[in-house]
Image (tube, coloured by chain):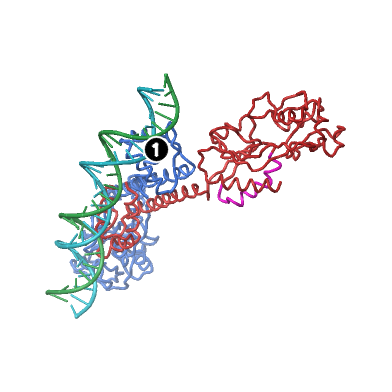
Chain colours: A blue, B red, C green, D cyan
Amino acid sequence: MDLRRLRYFVAVAEARSVGKAAERLRMAQPPLSVQIRKLEAEVGAPLFRRGTRGMDLTEAGQALLVRASEALALASDGIEAARAVASGKRGRLSVGYMFVLANAILPRLIPELRRSVPGVDLDFAELSASTREARVLDRSVTVALCMPAINHPEIQVARIGAQRFMLAIPTSSPLARLGSVPMARLHGRPLIALPHPDHGPASSAVVPLLRRHQVVMPIASRVETVHSAMSLVLAGEGLAILPACAQLGAPRGIVFRPLRDATDSLDIAVCWRRDSQSPLIGTFIKCAEKAVARM
Amino acid sequence: MDLRRLRYFVAVAEARSVGKAAERLRMAQPPLSVQIRKLEAEVGAPLFRRGTRGMDLTEAGQALLVRASEALALASDGIEAARAVASGKRGRLSVGYMFVLANAILPRLIPELRRSVPGVDLDFAELSASTREARVLDRSVTVALCMPAINHPEIQVARIGAQRFMLAIPTSSPLARLGSVPMARLHGRPLIALPHPDHGPASSAVVPLLRRHQVVMPIASRVETVHSAMSLVLAGEGLAILPACAQLGAPRGIVFRPLRDATDSLDIAVCWRRDSQSPLIGTFIKCAEKAVARM
DNA sequence: GCCAACCCATACGTTTTCGGTATGCCAATG
DNA sequence: CATTGGCATACCGAAAACGTATGGGTTGGC
């Protein structure tokens, strides 16, 4: 059963004539006649009544016609849909993001995305630091908004911005009275540590910063997420040094203060599988850059 | 766009491997690989990700897959449907019938038909004597239950029974007291004449019968249908000589009496276009014969 | 670290199928 | 009776598909 035969069949049925249909199909009449007879042989019954003034569908032919036209439409629609997905006009974009970035970026990113790729189904999923890499690798997210970037040979990265480190402290702390906090004032204070994803769970993202200023902070707790860190800060367990954007998700009772003389920052990056040929990634990066620029 | 390619594509997508799919399709692996690449060239985008352990659909491939499988199913369903119609397992049978036969035959015929051809859509239409031929010729009915048969070179006929002529008279008529009426008693009485369809509107179906018995009946009225005839009989306009089955549709106040010594009858026949290759006609005739036999 | 196994891609010759041209057959028409 | 219009058949050249042989890349085991 060949789609070409069905196409020919539909053409003949609509033209009610082999000759007319052949003309419309830009081919000679005899081969078309042959194809129709082959189709009839395959079905095992005549599909047309041959009259002296052209061809007319039999009942069997009518039964075939409706389904054949639908099948033709579906097939070409399928090709078209595949093209649309490949070109980025349609499809699905699954966006992973880390909680720190959610409040700062998503409100600007999502409308921008919907405007840029209106035919695309978007879905969003929060990523934890420990599983984000796997979620990108197994394609359960197409792109990931990360801070900092994922470091993996199969994963490609586009830096779209950076966030300065700031000090997260309880409003009640004496340090909160300062406009900015000199690094030296942190010496000896307990630190709520967030691990750097590249350096194992016992690491901290701010080790280089502290070392450079020769500040030593005993680690009071290790936590996985910025909101855990802020909860512990609020509980008086210690201070946290967090990227600036985290303050948008900060609870009442926590204030952020810049660190004087410390310009260290964490990169905000879009990360995706190197072999993902999704055409939406480029567009996504542009949208994310816009969203970051207006942060 | 070729249905074979789509079939191959679906097979590869389901097997997630060219080799496995080739085996299932009973063909060698290389040509299948070639066909897949040709399909990808036609779409203009890769449909599979080639990994080291087989093939995996891209998003574009997934978009195509759903539609391609539907298209395949529709196409083979179309072929199947055409076969079913051609074999008489499905389809439509449009049955025309003349009013005289309706009450006598349809109640037995319709259940019989529904049992014999359960997958077939039946529809029924009353035919008038003047248009029945055209309705068969233009195929607006597939078969016609007629009395008498249609006489036309393009129309084929199967005789399935016959109905004796009987006298239709008002209950109040003195003739109604007789068990059967001798032909001689009709001499001189006014006749409600039904034309014989083969002999023009001025004819009467009972001319040969009367002539053979040398009975002369003046024609009081000419009517088109048996129910008109019976209405006029009831109105006292005259007598009618009608096929026996008409009495099933007779109103109160009319009785039918056999004609003594007159065995003339009208054929009941199934009529259809000679070139109609509907496989249902044979079955229909069998059902109609059964229905007539139990009249 | 090399070799074997696995899987897809490419190359080439063979076979099948398709399309074009020429022509025949049939019925309707004048 | 000839002509016209429409489909069917015959034959040939062209295109497409299939099979066999083979290459190349990766995985996994010894």
Q: Nearer the viewer, residue D17 or A219?
A: D17
Q: Decide if residue B12 is in sight here.
A: yes
In the rendered image, residue B116, in percent from the top left (x then y), is placed at 59, 51
Q: Chain of mark 1?
A: A
Is residue B28 shown left or right of residue A248? left
Q: Nearer the viewer, residue D6 or C5?
A: D6
Q: Alpha-carbon neighbours of circle 1 within 10 Å: few (<14), some, or many (≥20)?
A: many
Q: Which residues are magenta?
A: B101-120
Q: Nearer the viewer, residue A207 or A178?
A: A207
Is residue B204 shown left or right of residue A274? right
Q: Decide if residue A285 is in sight here.
A: no
**Residue that badge 1 annotates:** A12
Is residue B221 shown left or right of residue A211? right
Give the vertical position of B229 relative to B97 (above or below): above
Q: Quadrant of residue A170?
A: bottom left
In the rendered image, residue B170, in percent from the top left (x then y), is placed at 83, 33
Per the image, label 1 sits on a secondary structure element best described as helix
Give the vertical position of B258 relative to B20 (above or below): above
In the rendered image, residue B194, in percent from the top left (x then y), is placed at 71, 29
Give the vertical position of B251 relative to B112 (above or below): above
